[in-house]
C-alpha cells in the first residue's frame, strides 16, 4: 500500500484564501491603475503640487486610498503565502510567514497614517 | 499502523517542490502562471518606492520637485516602465484567472490559447509603454 506523505494543514483554510484573493483582486482591478496613472501624469505632464495636494486631501480620495491600501496588503500577503508554501522549506515556513505578516501589518499602520495625517 | 508510519518515514525521499520547475517542460500556461507570480512580486517591491514618492509629493515644495525630477530621470522612467508592465500583465492575466474560476474559459484549449494571448499582449505593450514614457 502506497503511503502518501502530506504536510499538515488545516482543512478549511484554502478556500478562504482563494475567496479573499479574488475579492480583493476585483477591487484592485478598479483602484490600482489610478495611482499609476497619477505617477505617469506627474512624470509626463506639468502638474503643480497644489493640484496634487487638492487631489490627495479630498476625503473620498483618502477613503479610496485606504481601501486600496488594505486590499493591496491582503492580496499581496496571500500571494506571498502561496509562493512561500510552494518554495520555502517547511522548517522555516511558519516563522517566515509570521515575519511577513508582521511587516505587512506594520506597513499598513504606517501607510494609513501617511494617507490621513500628512501635513499635520 | 506503526508499520505504515515507519515505512513512511524510511521511504521519505526529499520531496520535489511544487510546482516542479525542474521537471515539467515549459508550456505557455506555465510561463503565463510564472509571469503572474513574478509580476506580483515586482508590484510588491514597488510599494516602498511608492511610499517614498507619496511622502515627497505631500512634503515641502523642494521635496515635491525632487520627486518629480527623480521620476523624470532614466531610472525613474525605467521603474515606471517595469511596474507598469507588471501592473498591466498582472491585471489582465488576473482577469483571465477569474474567467477560468467562473467556468467561462475552464477548458484546456482555451487555457492554452489564453496564456498565449497574455504573453503576446505583454510583447506588444512593452514597446508601446516605453514609447509613451520616452518619446
Image (tube, coloured by chain):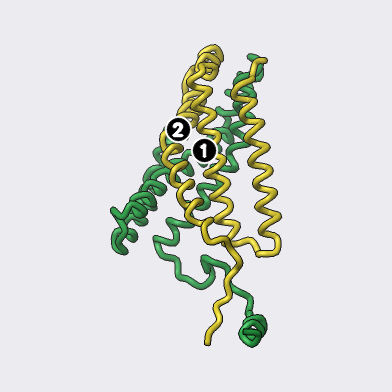
Chain colours: A yellow, B green
Q: CA–CA distance between discs 1 and 2? A: 10 Å
> How packed is label 2: few (under 14 Cα within 10 Å), some, or many (20 or more)?
some
Give the residue displayed 45% in from the left and 70% down from the top: B25
Asked whether, in this view, residue A98 is left or right of residue B79, the answer is: right
Kindly give the residue lying farthest to the front in the view shown.
B1
Give the residue displayed 44% in from the left and 46% down from the top: A22
The x, y position of residue A16, in whole percent, is: 49, 51
How many circles with numbers are drawn on the protein?
2
In the rendered view, tell whether residue A64 sits above or below residue A83: above
In front of the other: label 1 or label 2? 1
Q: Of the residues under marks 1 and 2, which one precedes in the sequence?
A: 2
> How packed is label 1: few (under 14 Cα within 10 Å), some, or many (20 or more)?
many
The x, y position of residue B81, in whole percent, is: 50, 38
Residue A71's tag is 1
Asked whether, in this view, residue A38 is left or right of residue B16, the answer is: left
Asked whether, in this view, residue A7 is left or right of residue B120, the answer is: right
Question: Mark 1 and 2 residues: CB-CB less than 8 Å, in contact?
Answer: yes
Which chain does the residue under circle 1 lie in? A
In the rendered view, tell whether residue A117 sits above or below residue B80: above
Give the residue displayed 46% in from the left and 32% down from the top: B133
The x, y position of residue B64, in whole percent, is: 61, 19
The x, y position of residue A60, in whole percent, is: 48, 20
Which chain does the residue under circle 2 lie in? A
Which residue in the structure is indicated by mark 2?
A: A31
SS at badge 2: helix
Residue B11's tag is none
Q: Nearer the viewer, residue B88 or A8?
A: A8
Q: Quadrant of the C terminus of chain B?
A: top left
In which image quadrant can residue B100 be found? bottom left
Amino acid at each position: 500500500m502506497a503511503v502518501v506523505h502530506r504536510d499538515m494543514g488545516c482543512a478549511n483554510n484554502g478556500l478562504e484564501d482563494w475567496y479573499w484573493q479574488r475579492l480583493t483582486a476585483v477591487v484592485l482591478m478598479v483602484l490600482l491603475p489610478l495611482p499609476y496613472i497619477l505617477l505617469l501624469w506627474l512624470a509626463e505632464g506639468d502638474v503643480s503640487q497644489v493640484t496634487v495636494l487638492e487631489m490627495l486631501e479630498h476625503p473620498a480620495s483618502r477613503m479610496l486610498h485606504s481601501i486600496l491600501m488594505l486590499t493591496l496588503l491582503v492580496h499581496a500577503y496571500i500571494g506571498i503565502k502561496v509562493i512561500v508554501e510552494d518554495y520555502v522549506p517547511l522548517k522555516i515556513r511558519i516563522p517566515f510567514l509570521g515575519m511577513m505578516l508582521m511587516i505587512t501589518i506594520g506597513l499598513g499602520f504606517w501607510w494609513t497614517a501617511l494617507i490621513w495625517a500628512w501635513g499635520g | 499502523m506503526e508499520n505504515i508510519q515507519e515505512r513512511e518515514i524510511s521511504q521519505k525521499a526529499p520531496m520535489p517542490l511544487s510546482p516542479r520547475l525542474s521537471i515539467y517542460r515549459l508550456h505557455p500556461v506555465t510561463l503565463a502562471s510564472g509571469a503572474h507570480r513574478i509580476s506580483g512580486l515586482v508590484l510588491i517591491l514597488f510599494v516602498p518606492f511608492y511610499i517614498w514618492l507619496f511622502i515627497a509629493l505631500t512634503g515641502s515644495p523642494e521635496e515635491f520637485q525632487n520627486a518629480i525630477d527623480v521620476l523624470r530621470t532614466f531610472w525613474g522612467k525605467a521603474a515606471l516602465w517595469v511596474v507598469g508592465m507588471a501592473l498591466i500583465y498582472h491585471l489582465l492575466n488576473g482577469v483571465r484567472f477569474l474567467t477560468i474560476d467562473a467556468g467561462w474559459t475552464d477548458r484546456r484549449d482555451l487555457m492554452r490559447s489564453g496564456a498565449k494571448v497574455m504573453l503576446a499582449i505583454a510583447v506588444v505593450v512593452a514597446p508601446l509603454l516605453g514609447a509613451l514614457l520616452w518619446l
